[in-house]
Image: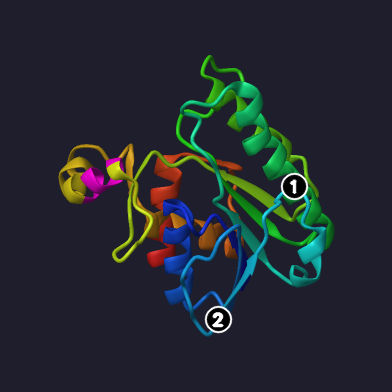
Amino acid sequence: MKVIITGATGMVGEGVLQECLVNPAIEKILLVNRKSSGYSHPKLEEVLHGNFNDIDPIANKMPGYDACYFCAGVSSVGMNEEDYYAATYTLTLNFAKALAGLNPQMVFCYVSGAGTDSTGKQMWARVKGKTENDLIKLPFKAVYNFRPAFMKPTRGAKNIKGFYKVINALYPVFRMFSSTYFLTLEEVARAMIYVSMKGYEKQILEVKDIADLSKQYSD
């Protein structure tokens, strides 16, 4: 497969990229980033683009891809709803709509988060829930919304947030007592690759779905 990845300068996107680089099912990777990821590989191409709301200037790079793993995103901490909506819903939908026009047979995987709920009380959950709902309406071959909770970074990752350094160190203990919330980023990426190749009956993938699909891919 040929895949597009966004957000590879963040922890989740970098973890997905690392798995795609070593996975034999992936033939070519196009990174779309605002700044350089620092990665170099024979099957990797990187395009730097500052405005995800308008991808027309780089549209000639994007046809012919089988899947997009949209891992770009911002934390809602310290943001008001208007700004978070613009950085999450508006940006994601603008990017996805343009991509659907270029690759209607593409599978689009969006990284949302555990607890996402378009009718919920938490601002971030409502915004991400609306984003999920409206992505599903776009004319892709398929759209899958991934809702991981806590994730163990991949070995050698550069973009690990402070809190996740603790999770990385204590992950074996956390996973032992709760497989409901704790995944590895390899599992998330393998589940994305699995649904891109074989599909899945659900469009919303909770932690257990992601873990189960990753195991199926490994098997």
Q: Which stretch did the figure color magenta?
A: 163-168
- Residue 85 position, x and y percent, is 65, 30
Seen at 34% across and 46% down, the residue is 161
Q: Secondary structure at mark 2?
A: loop
Residue 167 shown in magenta: yes
Q: Toward which corner of the image does residue 131 lie, by quadrant?
A: top right
- Residue 152 position, x and y percent, is 31, 51
The residue mark sitting in front, 1 or 2, is 1
Seen at 30% across and 66% down, the residue is 156
Q: Would you say 187 lies left or right of 145 here?
A: left
Q: Which residue is mark 1?
A: 53
| Mark 2, other Cα within 10 Å: few <14 / some 14–19 / many ≥20 | few
The answer to which of 48 and 110 lies nearer the viewer is: 48
Give the answer, above or below, for where 182 lies relative to 123: below
For the N terminus, the image quarter is bottom right
Q: Which residue is mark 2?
A: 43
Q: Earlier in the sequence, mark 1 or mark 2?
A: 2
Seen at 43% across and 67% down, the residue is 19
Tell me, yes or no, if residue 51 can be seen here. Answer: yes
Q: Would you say 86 lies left or right of 22 here?
A: right
